[in-house]
Image (cartoon, rainbow, N blue to C red):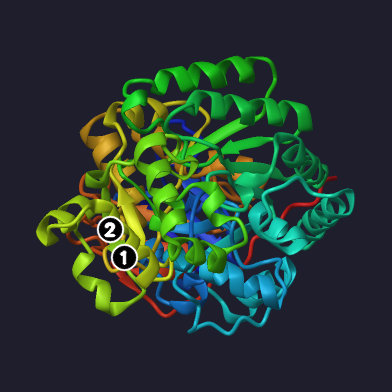
Amino acid sequence: MDLVITGARVIDGGGGPSYRADVGVDGGRITAIHREGDAGPRPSAARTLDAGGLALAPGFIDMHAHSDLALLRDPDHSAKAAQGVTLEVIGQDGLSYAPVDDRTLAEVRRAITGWNGDGSDIDFDWRTVGEYLDRLDRQGTAVNAAYLIPQGTVRILAMGWADRPPSADELDTMKRLVAEGMEQGAVGMSSGLTYTPGMYASGAELAELCRVAAAYGGYYCPHHRSYGAGALEAYAEMVELAKESGCPLHLAHATMNFAPNAGRGQDLLDLLDAAIAEGADISLDTYPYTPGSTTLAAMLPSWAGEGGPEATLARLADPAETARIRHTMEVEGSDGCHGVPIEWDTIEISGVSDPELAPYVGRTIAASAAERGEEPFAVAHRLLTADRLGTAILQHVGHEENVRTIMRHPVHTGGSDGLLQAAKPHPRAYGTFPRYLGRYSRDLGLLSLEECVAHLTSRPAARLRLPDRGLVREGHRADLVLFDPDTVADTATFDEPRSLPEGIPHVLISGRPVIRDGRRTDVLAGRSVRRTPLS
């Protein structure tokens, strides 16, 4: 064999009790598991890794990642590799970089600069989903990646940024683009229903696209229409959509935020349990933190985004339109801010595209306004226009009780929702998975270690329909992580968000060491993970 890991405490991802074993790896797969006390010879290999009692688990699967360009830009990618992540699901929130043409690529790059940077350092040598996945395979990446077809990007390609129903021909174009993306290896479709132009789609339009994804064995992953006012109704809309279309549903960063939803996490779970009892196929992911993270432009009302980024900037240059935007945000509560009047003391600037705006980073808009003797909206307006919509934010609107309640649900999985480009990104990009293992499993006891590992491995693998991942089993992929249950911990904070975790000394992808003795190697063993065809 290529490698034998000796003396490991195997937490196999299935949720059952751990056990001591030696685990053999050959050809990128697990080929032997010799439990303590088993008869017969122990496996031998050219290389041996002494686990010394460390926990050996399947590699963690990040069900909600924004590494679409980071995988190409940053071969190191320790933000995820050092957490034990071996597979990320990208193409999230309805906006990503395939399928596109020359026009829409430029527009999408502008729209999500705050998520991924402007891409000026990337050679965009693809246009289709398959070509993007091929690019990942040619280059090699630090971790594996699966792709969701972004519904907003598809809508832009079919009909631009118009706030109207599609024509029959436009809807047919969108359905064709989803089918092509699925045929080329996507695992499902995502939406961003508080982001333009995805939010312009009706439930009927979404159902048509979901039927296409379901026909290929894919699932639907919506960032639904509200995590604030009307959050339960927004979740219920997605549940009914899944029932109507027959498409499995995976709820992105499923939480209940803002003051109206304090203590209402169980209400969400009751809604999902009722649907599951009726036969609905539902799962969800969360990150173990209370603040969210997105762009400042996302807080704008949806009508301000019609026509695309340049049209938005034109409205912000018009005093009458600007006054209307301000009233909608501060008094009515814009749909971009989940129907809740914006509270500027909850909006912290985490990154800017224009270096001249760096003094705003790490400060709330309310604090910056107070320092300058200005109205908060004036500061927000300056950032939106001077940074050309490229400003990233943290939004401090979550509730710890809801976070803890939802993570215990049996259909829960882990997702970082990590934006990596900001000057001070959300620490979840560097700390989500060790935080689950350390703080919430070991320290708070909300999940047993075995159950916590299952949430991060076999459950997401099942949603992705990956029969050879997510478990320590003979024949499965040797995507593995060794960690110390007593010391594993996130160290990333809001002040030092790029601090790497502790207690995860070894990470393997296809049996190759991506992290060795706590340090990133130069191995690029990651590849695209494409949809398993329906039998």
Q: Residues within 10 Å of mark 1 (few under 14, many from 20)?
A: some
Q: Which kind of residue does numbered mark 2 sit on?
A: Ala
Screen quadrant of the C terminus: top right
Residue 257 at x, y = what percent?
Answer: 37, 33
Q: Quadrant for residue 50, please give it.
A: bottom left
* Secondary element at tag 2: helix
Residue that carries the numbered disc 2 in the rendered image: 378
Q: What residue occupies the far front of the structure in this picture?
A: 320
> 219 or 534, which lies in front?
219
Screen quadrant of the N terminus: bottom right
Residue 316 at x, y = what percent?
Answer: 44, 62
Residue 423 seen anywhere in this rendered image of the structure: yes
Q: Quadrant for residue 371, please give it.
A: bottom left
Q: Which kind of residue does numbered mark 1 sit on?
A: Arg
Point 38% across, 56% down: residue: 296
- Residues at discs 1 and 2 in contact (Cβ within 8 Å): yes
Point 48% across, 66% down: residue: 313
Residue 60 at x, y = what percent?
Answer: 46, 51
Residue 173 position (above or below residue 20): below
Residue 264 position (above or below residue 354): above
Point 60% across, 75% down: residue: 106
Point 29% across, 26% down: residue: 401
> 460 or 21, which lies in front?
460
